[in-house]
Image (cartoon, helix red, strand yellow):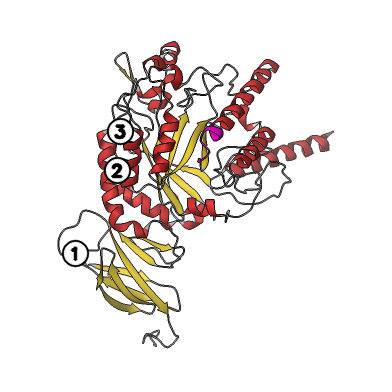
Amino acid sequence: MKRTSFTCLLAAFLSVAVSLNAQSQKPEKRISVKLEHGAHRLGKRTDKPMQAWRNYGLGQFIHWGVYAIPGGHWEGQYYPGAAEWIRSWKGMPKDAYDNLYKQFNPKKFNAKAWAKQAGDMGAKYVIITTKHHDGFCLWPSKYTDYTVANSPYKKDIIGQLVEAYDAEGIDVYLYFSIIDWNHPGYRSTLKSEQDRKEYEEFKKFTRNQLVELLTLYPSTKGLWFDGSWDKAWTEQAEFADALGKELREMIPGLIIGSRFRPDDNGNRHFDTNGDLIGDYEQGWERKMPNTIEDTNGNDWDCVMTVPENQWGYHSDWKGHVKTTNELIEMLVKAASLDGNFVLNFGPDGQGNIRSEETRLAAEIGEWMKENNEAVYGCGYLDWEKQDWGYYTVNRETGKKYMTVFNIPVSGALRVKVPGKTKLNKAYLLNDPGASLELEEIHRNEYFIHYKPASATDRPFVIGVETTDAKIEDGHYQKAKT
């Protein structure tokens, strides 16, 4: 009996340890467990749709729904949380919120204008909320009455956005929340047989809506899931796995990240063995890796808000609001670590994109028009990072770039190249005919001398050219004593 008890305790401990390890940001594979619903592929996808995803560089996120009507306030009270969560706030009566759709009539909404603004910013893909946790659908779903079709606006918003962004040459990804506070069968946990019975109806509803979305909008390139952390959902490994396969069969090449389905033990993102579930890692929400090692060799994207934590429209942005240069730096940093950067916009209840977001989009767009060569199609360059900024390299051409955010007082930008590499030329991307002075200071180490003729308030890009170096190149040797 004691031996049996000890064995059971040991097995339980190992199970918990493996589960916690798989949920971590830096999974370390310690134990190999046979899984039916774990990762279906090791390593990166190499097909054309995934290669296109990998080369986007910059994306846009749109959070929009009836939560934009209160805009973070109710009856004179300020809601300090993320605006799209206001229904969960004790100061927001549930019945009042659930009837806000009767006021949803965004007369200023212009899908073409949104798409053009995104295109001018330089976005190559967009993630659009089809419905958030409140369950209100921005398309006329036939599986619920809680849709835009029953609002004063009536028209299909998702259809307009898909058409407009497709016309602008921006690939569309559809956001879908597994959580649905409006559906009677939704549960966060399953505590009884009645819960399980009703949750089965919710699962059918979820499947029907996803199939409906891909049927209505077949140009969709991928699905971006949210709200999959509930214990009730993490127990649905078999169902979610089968559903994912069905959706992928509908649109060959469909891209789904790591937030959608759990493995056999309820782990998301990484399975029990530490392998990525899905096509890319979605763990970088409002945060970024600092080194290539942090990415674990996976494709990834970062979704980022402008204020600290406001996705949907909140009329009051309190605390730090990110600047154009901060956002450009995040964009370039993401590219330098083989990731994409996705900037969020939260339109108001009338369909206006707020002035702060409009200004940021315009300023990012101005920078991208001149410097996008260092972002699109670019990724990690295995050179030692320096304090002035970030390296990127074009995956097809091999062209190398330095995006400079911090100019040393001396004007000397240090560059260390790997062995058997020689730095031959450096030039400003916006003036490629003018070479910058190179100074070799050690073998494989150089200064690029640059002092701007006038003060600059934006980062700039330097292109660099290299050749293979011979052993005898250079004249440096270790000092002899």
Q: Is residue 177 above or below residue 169?
A: above
Residue 33: x percent and y percent? Answer: 72, 46
Tell whether label 3 touches label 2 (CB within 8 Å). Answer: yes
Q: Which region is colored magenta?
A: 213-219
Give the amino acid type for the residue marked by disc 2 in the picture: Ala
Tell whether label 1 touches label 2 (CB within 8 Å). Answer: no
Q: Which numbered tag is attached to residue 62?
A: none
Location of the C terminus (image quadrant): bottom left
Query: 280 or 173, which is in the foreground?
Result: 173
Residue on which disc 3 sits: 353
Residue 57: x percent and y percent? Answer: 41, 52
247 to the left or right of 415: right
Residue 393: x percent and y percent? Answer: 42, 64
Mark sitting earlier along the chain (3/1)? 3
**Residue in the picture at 30% in, 30% down:** 352
Mark sitting earlier along the chain (2/3)? 3
Residue on which disc 1 sits: 452
The span from disc 2 to disc 3 (Cα, nearest Å) is 10 Å
The span from disc 3 to disc 1 (Cα, nearest Å) is 35 Å
Residue 76: x percent and y percent? Answer: 29, 15
> Is label 3 in a helix, a strand or a loop?
loop
274 to the left or right of 169: right
Q: Residue furthest left?
A: 454
Q: Quadrant of residue 117?
A: top left
**Residue in the picture at 52% in, 24% down:** 141
Mark sitting earlier along the chain (2/1)? 2
Q: Residues within 10 Å of mark 2 (few under 14, many from 20)?
A: many
Residue on which disc 2 sits: 361
Q: Quadrant of residue 232?
A: top right
> Is label 2 in a helix, a strand or a loop?
helix
